[in-house]
Image (tube, coloured by chain):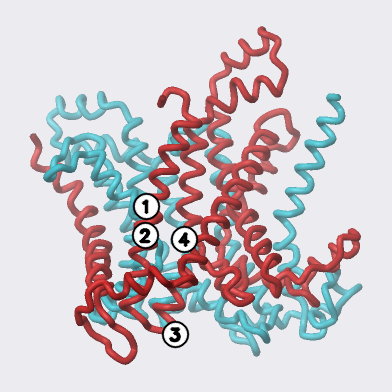
Chain colours: A red, B cyan
Amino acid sequence: MYRQKYLFLLPGLLVLVAIILFPLLFTIRVSFSSWDVYNPGLDWIGGENYGRLWEDARYWQALGRLTLLSVTTVLIQYVLGFALALMVWRDLAARRLFRVLFLIPMMTTPVVMSVLWRTIFHESLGPLNPILESLGIGAAPWLSSAGWAFAAVVIVEVWQWTPFMFLLLLAGLLSLPNEPYLAAKIDGAGPVRTFFSVTFPMLGAISVGAILIRLIEASKIMETVYVLTSGGPGTSTETSSYYIYIRGMRDFQIGYSAALSLTYLIIMIVALTVIAKLLVRALVKDAA
Amino acid sequence: MKTLYLALKYLAIALWSAFVVFPFLWALTTSFKSANGVTGGATWIPWVQYEPSLQGWQSLFGGVGGINVVKPFYNSLVVTLSASVISITLGTLAAYALSRFTFRFLWMRNSDITFFFISQRIMPPIVLAIPFFLMLRSLGLLDSLPGLILVYVALLMPIAVWVMVDFFNGVPRGLDEMAWMDGCNPITTFWRVILPNALPGLVVAGMFCIIFGWNDFFFAFTLTFTETQLLPVAIVSLNSSVTPWWSLSAAALVSIAPLVVLAFVVERFLSKGGLAGAVR
């Protein structure tokens, strides 16, 4: 029809293709080479890197840990974000002030906050342990023991990104029509019933969207880990991105890290597609 | 029952508010400490528990033992704003095309092309970091502002397209048709009729671009050395075993402050219902 339509689409499309596709093709090619510090260049070693990856326990452990971390943090964020959105939805004095306050963490630079959190978690000089002691809970070895370091990462992620869930769900709540609530009231449904048979189903689509966006972002987690724990103690908080970073940017094993990142990318795409399908089936009513 | 519910609700709100505010208050009080104030253990109240000092804040402008944030702040500003403007311009044009015209490249239809744009957000930065590094090096753009802007455009354009496609789908087609009947071609239609009506969408897209651009760390970290350090990179470079906590806190507050203002803007949109369309 109109020739001009290409003038609209192509500039953006071509720029994105140029910036993304070349690096991706390059990575695919490099993953079949032995490019490293001693031997920089594109030779051809077939699938050797992929064979090595298959045996690399540290890689698979990092992937398992990433899965656990993403699912845990996103679930906590969803539940808390939903609860907070419901609380400041209506019937609350100064609700607009609390809305602003609850949004603020997602505006802050994650890596800068992580630097601050690191001082908060500091075992002898940080403020967290004294508070826990005064509450009678007792001090914790936050960044020096495996379990606590993992908990620290979860806390930071929850602080940072619960506001994102809160934002999307509150936007959803505010756009809901009034009639179903009137109907529920006439039927004599209590607040709990109203929530489960009116509010929750109507926010199904937004819930799926919010959870998916957060899962996608969480699957890339590495900055928090880099600043807070550097993957430690040992490798106990190492995520996939961080392990690939160590192999690629620190050890300079370009070829091997390319194979690692492509495998990681493919696993993420497959996993997220499956999760998306399942979530839509479980939470969106009219999709079945 | 009702009172118990209300009490629990206010308790929950108070607890979460405290959790949200906690790191900021800690940073604020720490930024006025000196070495003695920090090594004495965690304290909160100036004059009473520790002797306040301006050392941390002075170090931001070239004082001793911290980082000078002026140049990194400027770099961050330039990169974020330029990349946002470019991404939104290209993204808005593409989004309009995808919303109004039909395309067919090989097997790909409009929805596939839209998905291609948006799906770039799935890409973990680490996958692209090394090729970007080599690519910018061969272009001579490593450790330079144009190089960073180029990379940030790729990072932000998917967001702009995502917001604007949704937005344009909500703008009635009747508007376009009326303009066509008045003799406009697609370009003049877009320029004179659609764009003036797209302001709310542009604001939302701009906000998201600025948040993601300003807050990104990884590409700035891997693609620059010393010349064009961005703010987050400069702050993280302070993060070591002998970190001067006072400069660190002051610098962190400076880097966070500009975007906290955005929380107010977002809330305004939210409470007026302007975001409901954008998140659907």
Q: Which residue is mark 3?
A: B226
- Image check: A252 left or right of A40? right
In the displayed structure, A255 sits above or below A54; it is below
From the image, state whether disc 1 or disc 3 is nearer to you: 1
- Amino acid type of the residue tagged 1 in the rendering: Ile
In the rendered structure, which disc, 1 or 4, sits on the residue that comes first in sequence?
4
Distance Cα–Cα, label 1 vs label 4: 12 Å
Please say if the residues under marks 1 and 3 sit with CB atoms less than 8 Å apart: no
Secondary structure, mark 3, is loop
Residue A74 lies, with reference to residue B77, above or below; the image says above
| Residue type of the residue flagged with mark 4 | Lys
**Circle 1 crowding by C-alpha within 10 Å: few under 14, some 14–19, many from 20:** some
Q: How far apart in space, not on screen, are marks 4 and 3 (Cα)?
A: 26 Å
For image coordinates 37% across by 69% down, the residue present is: A260
The secondary structure type at the circle numbered 4 is loop
- CA separation in Å, label 2 and label 1: 6 Å
Q: Residue at x 43, y 23 (%)?
A: A286
How far apart, in angstroms, are the residues tagged by discs 4 and 2?
10 Å
Q: Could you classify mark 2 by the number of other residues whose Cα lies within 10 Å: few (under 14), some (14-19), or many (20 or more)?
A: some
Which residue corresponds to mark 1?
A269
Q: CB of mark 1 within 8 Å of CB of mark 4?
A: no
The amino acid at mark 2 is Leu
Residue B146 visible in image: no
Disc 4 versus disc 3: nearer the observer: 4
Please give the residue where the numbered disc 4 appears in the rendered image.
A220
Spatial CA span between label 1 and label 3? 35 Å
